[in-house]
Amino acid sequence: MDYEILYPGAFPLLKVQLSKGETLKAESDAMVSMASTIDVEGKMEGGLLGGIGRMLAGEKFFFQTLNARRGPGEVLLAPAIPGDIVDVDLDGSYGLVVQKDGFLAGSMGIEVSSKMQNLMQGLFSGEGFFTLKISGRGTAFLNSYGGIHAINLEAGEERIIDNSHLVAWPDYMDYKIEKATSGWISSFTSGEMLVCRFKGPGVVLIQTRNPQGFGGWIKGLLPDNR
């Protein structure tokens, strides 16, 4: 599967060249354009429970599958929100935990399921009780709100990350929810409140913009209709 990320930055496109017989799975409604040799259909991967699990993790119930049954062809995909696209190669030795709406597409060796978090993480991480888990062997394409930045943590190294900026991290990494500062009042007045503390080794992908902050900014511009 040959691919290229076009126009990297705020408004990228993912261009994938499929050979005859190759199949690509993608988030529902991600397809922008495709060759006439490509067939697209919706599939409920993992059965009913798999679809429900993905919905609880913030994804859609069905996937798109794009199959080059009748010959080679090009597919163009794009996420719904402005932000970067990054490719991650998985060798089957570990999986990725991914934020809501973070999965764009993947080769057929990639499996997308849901992972349940503990009570503290579910209540306060901003991701809910279910997150996406991407595993298997192949290439996964993730998207973000804003640019994607990788934080590489060495063994034992810790990093505090605002939960609204998380994109993905290896499933073997754990994290704790804690106050942004030593006291609740200071945490509240700083505007940070609760944050995530990750401990290496591992690479955490973060996004450069906060969708909740942007939503608050837009709300402040709207006229008061009360």
Image: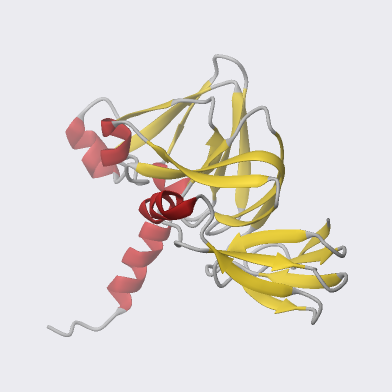
Residue 13 seen from this side: no
* Residue closest to the far left: 226
* Residue closest to the far top: 156
In depth, the one of 119 and 65 nearer the eye is 65
State the image quarter where residue 66 is shown. Answer: bottom right
Residue drawn 62% across the image and 20% down it: 154
State the image quarter where residue 18 is shown. Answer: bottom right
Residue 210 in percent (x, y) is at 44, 55
In depth, the one of 126 and 38 nearer the eye is 38
State the image quarter where residue 202 is shown. Answer: top right
Residue 28 seen from this side: yes
Residue drawn 36% across the image and 66% down it: 215
Q: How many marks?
A: 0
Residue drawn 26% across the image and 25% down it: 182
Residue 177 in percent (x, y) is at 33, 30
15 left or right of 219 in image = right
- Image quadrant where one finds the C terminus: bottom left
Residue 201 in percent (x, y) is at 60, 21
| Residue 81, placed above or below residue 178 | below
- Image quadrant where one finds the N terminus: bottom right
In depth, the one of 154 and 44 nearer the eye is 44
Residue 52 in percent (x, y) is at 38, 54
113 left or right of 4 in image = left
4 left or right of 184 in image = right
